[in-house]
Amino acid sequence: RKGGAGGGGGGGEEGFGYQGMRHQGGMEGGGFRGGAGFGGGAPPAWLTNAVHEVCNHPGLCDPPLDPDTVLMMLSDLPMGAAKFILQRAQAKADTISDPIGFIESKAGEQREALAKKQAKQVQKEANIAAEAQRQAMSAAKKQGLNPFVHQPVLQDRSAARVGGKQDKVVAQLPEHVHKRIQWLNQNGGLMQPVDMSRVSGALVATQQASQVAVLARLKEQGPGIEDPNAWLIKELRSERRQEQIRGGVVAAIGEVTVRRIEWLNTKGGLLQPLELQVARGPLQSVGPEVRAEVLNTLKEQALGIEDPAAFLVTECRRIRTEALEAAAEQGDEEAVKRLAKKRRMEEGGEGITV
């Protein structure tokens, strides 16, 4: 079986490699440290072995599973979730008609469950912080003090203003984001400190992985940015737009295909980046197997393709036309009509999508 992006197995030449979702970093000492996930590097041995065991299972070989595809589907999941999915696939091997679809579906369920768990944890932390603040303010009032004069905990968290809706927004942010900002204000060489009262709303509205990515860029570029707060708000807005775009493309062509495109853009040696929105149209017009075939061809011929987007359009159109011609030869009347219409329009100098 041929390796790579297609629907074959794990043999053959180098496949798409391993590409996880953007991982969340942490911070230790003077800088950021890598967090969960494998950051696009090689998968751990236990996962590789487990995936190959599933791909070689007699009950899951029709259609055959591609190890690279399975690895990409599980790349962003915790160890326990990935193991659970692979074990379920083996346990239900005799009843699964579409193994790759089963694994993709279970991976989606695990991500949803993790997102709900994370949301509950964020809410729990927010409730604890709000209750602690309420008790502190109540104690201060009993002692005849003004609770708004001195709040050392919030000052440690980048001097966020106390009280009202703003403080509730700040409390929704995870601890590691507060620590990153605190580190940037103390050690990042910023021209101005990051003001949580200004940026907390933009941070809360953005996914955590994107928060981390933007703060990492601020760490690298900080000394040259005149207004870090305005810069953060703008970059977070841009990240949210990209999240929306990516979500729409994933809905159209699938998470695995999107990750392959992202891998090509970062590690595939493309002469020009392939934008997700541009790739969506041609890839949506063909099936999953054809998408994998086209992207694998793009990977193999990357250095000789000047315009990856144009290549996708041409290649997908060629494959659709070949499929239409084959159907017409087999007597499919609808295919015959569509093929005749296509040829008439081509002779008249007009393009047509088939």
Image (cartoon, rainbow, N blue to C red):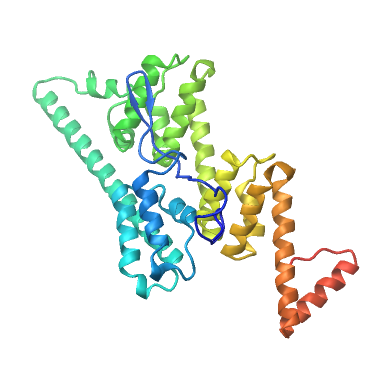
Instruction: Give residue 61's quadrant in the image.
Output: bottom left
Q: Nearer the viewer, residue 57 or 146?
A: 57
Q: Position of residue 74 (x, y in %)?
A: 40, 52
Q: Is residue 151 visible?
A: no
User: In this orientation, which residue lies closer to the viewer: 208 or 336?
Assistant: 336
Side of 204 relative to 247 (left or right): left
Whether residue 166 is visible here, answered yes or no, is yes
Q: Residue extending furthest right?
A: 348
Please identify the quadrant where the C terminus is shown: bottom right
Residue occupying the point 36% across, 49% down: 47
x, y percent for residue 60: 41, 68
Residue closer to the observer: 233 or 100 = 100
Name the residue: 41% across, 56% down: 52
Residue 301: give x, y in percent of width and height: 69, 47
In the picture, measured across the screen, residue 2 lies left or right of residue 208, that is right
Q: Indicate left or right for 72 with 305 as reference.
A: left
Count of marks, rendered view? 0
Judge whether 179 appears above or below 72 on screen: above
Task: Estimate the x, y position of residue 336 in percent, counting from the top left.
Answer: 77, 81
Residue drawn at x 51%, y 52% is: 247
Q: Quadrant of the N terminus?
A: bottom right
Query: Does residue 268 lie above or below 335 as drawn?
Result: above
Query: Which residue is more in the foreground, 84 or 219?
Result: 84
